[in-house]
Image (tube, rainbow, N blue to C red):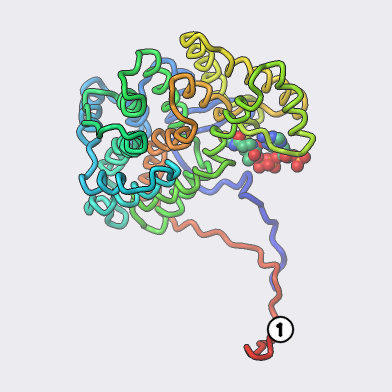
Amino acid sequence: MPEPARVQRGLEEVVALESRICFIDGKLGRLIYRGYDIRDLAAKATFEEVAYLLWYGRLPNARELTELRGRLGELRTLPDPLSRMIDTLPADAAPMDVLRTSVSALALYEPAETKAGATAIAGAERLTACLPTILGTFHRRRKGLPRLRARPELSPAAYLLYALLDREASELEERALDVALILHADHELNASTFAARVTASTLSDLYSSVTSAIGALKGPLHGGANERAIELAELIGTPDRAEAIVKEKLARHERIMGFGHRVYKVEDPRATILREWSRKIGEAKGDLHYYEVLERVKEVVQREKGLYPNLDLYSGSVYTPIGIPHDLFTPIFAVSRVSGWTAHILEEYEDLRLIRPTAQYIGPTDLSWVPLGDRT
Ligand code: COA
């Protein structure tokens, strides 16, 4: 047996590849997409501009942005057999499972884009355009609402809200979701992006790579944390109950979802921005209780464990007052992150190297074969 190697469990601090897409400074709490600070993007950009930036490596000019908006609107319509398939799925299915299965099924209608190693941005645009429609179609079917026309004039955020709420969103609601989509769009080699790149590195196609990513995002240690964070806020109910409930959970060694991060050692800058939106939306709706409960939870967890909030702590407190159901929080994360996943997949194709680490084998090597009849 060779000398045991040093195992980096969870690949912590392993630098697996070079990328020009996203930079996280975990000590200073900075997040950069293609050179631009997330705080500037959240204040000034739209989600479509950010998607363009991630895919093309630069901001679009006015004509390019108008054209991208037009394409995303046009590409929003699902193939009819896929809409019909979504209508046959169990109404109580988890929306994340519906999203994963539908993205996988969409590939069957996109032969050009499912060729091994196809590198066209067209596939990235198609997926980014279709994810809100998939979610909207499923949500409307489970609510018994009629199917929606594509409304190509609406932004992805406005269209998704229109589909989910069955009403026009206010300007503030649309901007809140748009900012949330900007904040979730990319985050370097997080688990789902890594899953996407591993799949792409085998020269598999864009749709298969995004399907892998959705599976990874679903887990509560990754995208699933946002649903758990709002459940905790609802369990706590009022700010005065936060201290006791959080301390009880910590005493039982339970994780408080929405806190801690593998890379950030200070507050996640996305959490700082979303906290402000949680307050703004709470004020507009005349109900600040989620914001106030989470403020107390933050104080207690920071004091007791020295852990800072990540963006999953606040997304639900922005979405819930708007009327978005909890089980759509993680799928909305995917609606945004698909822009980053596809940027990374395209980058992987440009500088392809099969991702295939090794394991330190710690099992036996010299067992003698036992015939079936002799085994206990
Ligand atoms: N609540 C309570 N304790 C936590 C915690 C949390 N949210 N996050 C980390 N810790 C504790 C661990 O229990 C561990 O304590 P120990 O050393 O006494 O065992 C210590 O902090 C280190 O945790 P570890 O899991 O090794 O850190 P990591 O870098 O692997 O964890 C996360 C990163 C994100 C998986 C982790 O912080 C977590 O589970 N957070 C909750 C889920 C979440 O919000 N995910 C979204 C991330 S954007």
Find residue 283 and report its horizontal and vertical position in percent: 51, 9
Say which of 145 and 155 sits in front: 145
Say which of 332 and 344 sits in front: 332
Under tag 1, what secondary structure?
A: loop
Q: Is residue 147 above or below residue 36?
A: below
Name which residue type carries label 1.
Thr
Q: Is mark 1 within 8 Å of ligand 1?
A: no
Q: Is residue 152 above or below residue 176?
A: below
Q: Is residue 262 among the parts visible in the rendering?
A: no
Find residue 264 and report its horizontal and vertical position in percent: 62, 31
Say which of 45 and 19 sits in front: 45
Q: Is residue 289 among the parts visible in the rendering?
A: yes
Figure quadrant, ligand 1: top right
Q: Residue at x 32, y 35 (%)?
A: 144
Q: Residue at x 70, y 71 (%)?
A: 363
Residue under pointer 1: 376
Q: Number of numbered discs present?
A: 1
Q: Residue at x 31, y 37 (%)?
A: 137
Residue 138, by quadrant, is: top left
Q: Is residue 9 above or below residue 251?
A: below
313 lies left or right of 78: right
